[in-house]
Image (cartoon, rainbow, N blue to C red):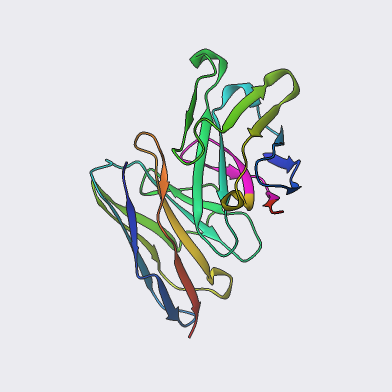
Amino acid sequence: EVQLVESGGGLVQPGGSLRLSCAASGFTFSDYYMDWVRQAPGKGLEWLGRIRKKANSYTTEYAASVKGRFTISRDDSKNSLSLQMNSLKTEDTAMYYCARGHWGLDSWGQGTLVTVSS
Amino acid sequence: DIQMTQSPSSLSASVGDRVTITCRASQGISRWLAWFQQKPEKAPKCLIYDASSLHSGVPSRFSGSGSGTDFTLTISSLQPEDFATYYCLHYNGYPYTFGPGTKVDIK
């Protein structure tokens, strides 16, 4: 069974940084692209970015709203995906989900909540 | 960037009703469209990918159709567990974008 478990969320001040992690199990992590999606409280879903697999040189794509501030990385040896978030803004407050980038986004974690507030 | 719209934004329906939700892309996306169901305080769940392919384990009362710019999600006979918010997603190039969602609630 595919399982994705996010961690690392919490309260951070505006301008601060936070690193989210996503632990994957139940599938061959290194074979798949991986994505991050977020959802602000009471709002819709926003795709944030993707990291491809080794065969595609681990290249990344980002939404304009986070490009230059957020960085996606992965460690295939640990079946782990990360999202480094810098220069955080109050509008970055959201539930953050990792998702497997297959057939659209076919499997999701349960999310981790990030709150940016002073 | 490709913009996605959905209609209606919300609807009220009864158990057993046939429900249709529409998603429209601002430019052609072939069949690179997925549908998701999200219940309150839960992660989204993939229902349909490639416009009409049913994700594993999804009941057959869900179906998807369309190509190009216009797509439809149909629930043939609404069940109590189907009351939720539904989102479409295009994956025809970057950035991916979601529709704003359609909330289906009890009439």
- Which quadrant holds the N terminus of chain B? top left
Q: Is residue B2 visible?
A: yes
Q: Is residue A1 visible?
A: no
**Residue at 65%, 41% in the rendered image:** A15
> Where in the figure is residue A99, as x and y percent of width and height?
59, 40
> Where in the figure is residue A45, as x and y percent of width and height?
51, 53
In the displayed structure, B24 sits above or below A63; it is below
Nearest to the observer: residue B51 or residue A110: A110
Nearest to the observer: residue A87 or residue B63: A87
**Residue at 46%, 40% in the rendered image:** A104
Snapshot quadrant of residue A28 = top right
In the image, taking residue A73 as reference, residue A77 lies left or right, namely right
Instruction: Give the magenta-colored segment's residue range.
Output: A96-114
Residue placed furthest toward the bottom: B107
**Residue at 72%, 35% in the rendered image:** A21
In the displayed structure, B93 sits above or below A114; it is above
How many numbered marks appear? 0
**Residue at 68%, 20% in the rendered image:** A76
Snapshot quadrant of residue A88 = top right
> Where in the figure is residue A26, as x and y percent of width and height?
70, 34
Residue B97 among those drawn in magenta: no
In the displayed structure, A20 sits above or below B60; it is above
Snapshot quadrant of residue A17 = top right
In the displayed structure, B50 sits above or below A84; it is below
Residue A100 among those drawn in magenta: yes
> Where in the figure is residue A85, as x and y percent of width and height?
64, 36
